[in-house]
């Protein structure tokens, strides 16, 4: 059996340990380099995506402004339609009132009374008397 203080065995053990550590270090180094390359590539991709998102956001802002203008214009037009409808309803009500008044007056004339419930008078005489 060899002695633990044999310089040749100590040197072989040291060389084996160094080779093993170099192998592990190389493996870790390659893994870290791969991860660093991925991080760098992802960083560039994220920067491009961020730029694209900023551009798209600006475009959406412009579209929002355009759509807001369309909505405002449509609201104003609907308000005008409502105003016209209200005006038309007022005129229709007035025309119905005039129509009813004329109907009552016509009925009164056909029944021989004036609109105040009295017999109509022409030139100081009662209508129908001569």
Image (cartoon, rainbow, N blue to C red):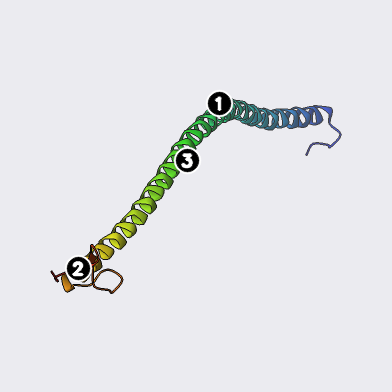
Mark before the other along the chain sequence, 1 or 3: 1
Quadrant including the C terminus: bottom left
Label 3 or label 2, whichever lies nearer to me, is: 2
SS class of the residue under badge 1?
A: helix
Answer left or right for 6 relative to 43. Answer: right
SS class of the residue under badge 2?
A: helix
Answer left or right for 54 relative to 111. Answer: right
Disc 2 target residue: 109
User: Which quadrant of the structure image shows residue 89?
Assistant: bottom left
Q: Nearer the viewer, residue 1 or 87?
A: 87
Q: Nearer the viewer, residue 80 or 119?
A: 119
Q: Position of residue 33 (x, y in %)?
A: 64, 26
Kindly check if marks 3 and 2 are in contact, taking CB atoms under 8 A apart as contact. Answer: no
Q: CA distance from mark 1 to mark 3?
A: 36 Å
Label 1 or label 3, whichever lies nearer to me, is: 3
Q: Residue at x 57, y 26 (%)?
A: 51
Q: Residues within 10 Å of mark 3 (few under 14, many from 20)?
A: few
Q: Position of residue 61 (x, y in %)?
A: 53, 33
Q: Position of residue 105 (x, y in %)?
A: 24, 66
Q: CA distance from mark 1 to mark 2?
A: 90 Å
User: Which quadrant of the structure image shows residue 40?
Assistant: top right
Answer left or right for 20 relative to 75. Answer: right
Q: CA distance from mark 3 to mark 2?
A: 55 Å
Label 1 or label 2, whichever lies nearer to me, is: 2
Mark before the other along the chain sequence, 1 or 2: 1
The circle drawn on residue 21 is none
Q: Position of residue 90 (x, y in %)?
A: 37, 56
Quadrant including the N terminus: top right
The circle drawn on residue 48 is 1
SS class of the residue under badge 3?
A: helix
């Amino acid at each position: 059996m060899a002695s633990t203080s044999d310089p040749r065995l100590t040197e072989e053990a040291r060389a084996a340990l160094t080779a093993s550590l170099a192998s592990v270090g190389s493996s870790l180094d390659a893994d870290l380099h791969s991860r660093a390359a991925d991080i760098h590539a992802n960083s560039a991709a994220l920067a491009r995506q961020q730029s694209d998102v900023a551009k798209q956001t600006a475009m959406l802002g412009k579209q929002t402004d355009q759509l807001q203008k369309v909505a405002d214009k449509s609201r104003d037009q609907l308000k005008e339609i409502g105003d016209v409808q209200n005006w038309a309803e007022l005129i229709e009500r007035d025309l119905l009132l005039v129509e009813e008044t004329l109907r009552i007056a016509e009925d009164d004339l056909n029944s021989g009374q004036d609109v105040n419930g009295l017999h109509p008078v022409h030139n100081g005489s009662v209508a129908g008397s001569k």
